[in-house]
Amino acid sequence: MNAIIAANVQVPSSGAAAIIADFAEHAIRVAYIARRDISRLPEAEWRVPGIYVLIADDGSHSVYVGKSTDLRSRVMQHKLANAHVPGWSRAVLIKRDTSNGFTSADVGYLEGRLSAELDAISGIVVVKGKTDGDSTLPPHMQMSLDALLSSILASVRLAGVDTHREDDGGEQSPSAVSRTQIPGTVADLLAEGLLHAGAELHCARAGKHGVGTVAPDGQIIVNGVGYTAPSLAAGISLGAQSSAGYGGWELWHVGSLSGPKLADLRSQLPKS
């Protein structure tokens, strides 16, 4: 069963006002607004740090991901001119719905993560501006922000962007239906305390060395993109484009190449 990401959506009677969605689980507030109406965003609420997505409705499937310490002012600048996606028509503005809000380092990191996640989806063209991302945050802060990605991606999907990634639906593929499937996921390892979020994973093959990080939801983050299937994460980390021939459970080691394999940890899961 697919998990449900709950959102409270407020649709104003005025067609020019922003639609607001609150993702309570992660205290995320999102505004959906047309380019022509950006000036209608309340300054007191939206002149804050956050990330944004500009969406083109011209058939190009183009999006532009950005960040700012003043969301409203930055998107107003894009309204006047944007060399990267000149024909953008809609914007998604994302901020933290808490008293402290995001820091500039937070939004730098989230910009890079969201840009990488969307860029990994075949039907989306992420138009690149300057180099995205912020690597100055300590690992524990990166991990706390990684936990927000499910709500952030859901907020982009709510704008009508197809965020489905066919390459990461799990380990089993149509060509492998006869293969013996061993129960257990990385999320199960986290739940049983056999693995912790933020753990660094290493794999190697043919002289190449891949690195990943365990996210709080059990995904393995490689190059800014989260993968549910360990085999696909391993393949991508080693320069492949698919999971074919990569047994992620056997390839991934925890902490270093001499550390325990994910398969060893999976073998310790309680038998159902």
Image (tube, rainbow, N blue to C red):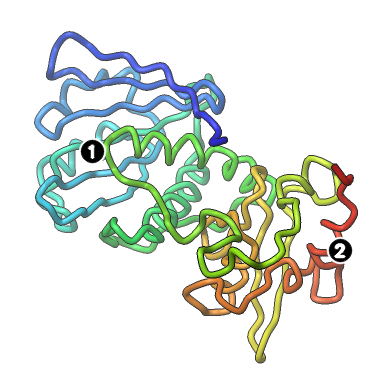
Residue denoted by label 2: 264
Q: Which mark is residue 75?
A: 1
Please state which of residues 59 and 87 is positioned toward the viewer in this rendering: 59
Q: Is residue 69 left or right of residue 193?
A: left
Please state which of residues 232 and 51 is positioned toward the viewer in this rendering: 232
Please state which of residues 64 and 234 is positioned toward the viewer in this rendering: 234
Local SS, label 2: helix
Q: Is residue 250 left or right of residue 153?
A: right
Local SS, label 1: helix
Above or below residue 71? Residue 163 is below
Q: Which mark is residue 99?
A: none
Q: Mark 2 or mark 1: which is in front?
A: 2
Q: CA distance from mark 2 to mark 1?
A: 49 Å
**Residue type beneath disc 1:** Val
Q: In the image, what residue occupies the spot 75% across and 51% down?
A: 184
Q: In the displayed orientation, state which residue is furthest to the front.
A: 178
Above or below residue 250? Residue 81 is above
Q: How many residues crowd mark 2 within 10 Å: few (<14), some (14–19), many (20+)?
A: few
Q: In the image, what residue occupies the spot 64% across and 43% down?
A: 217
For residue 1, what is the image quadrant? top right
Point out the image quarter for the C terminus. top right
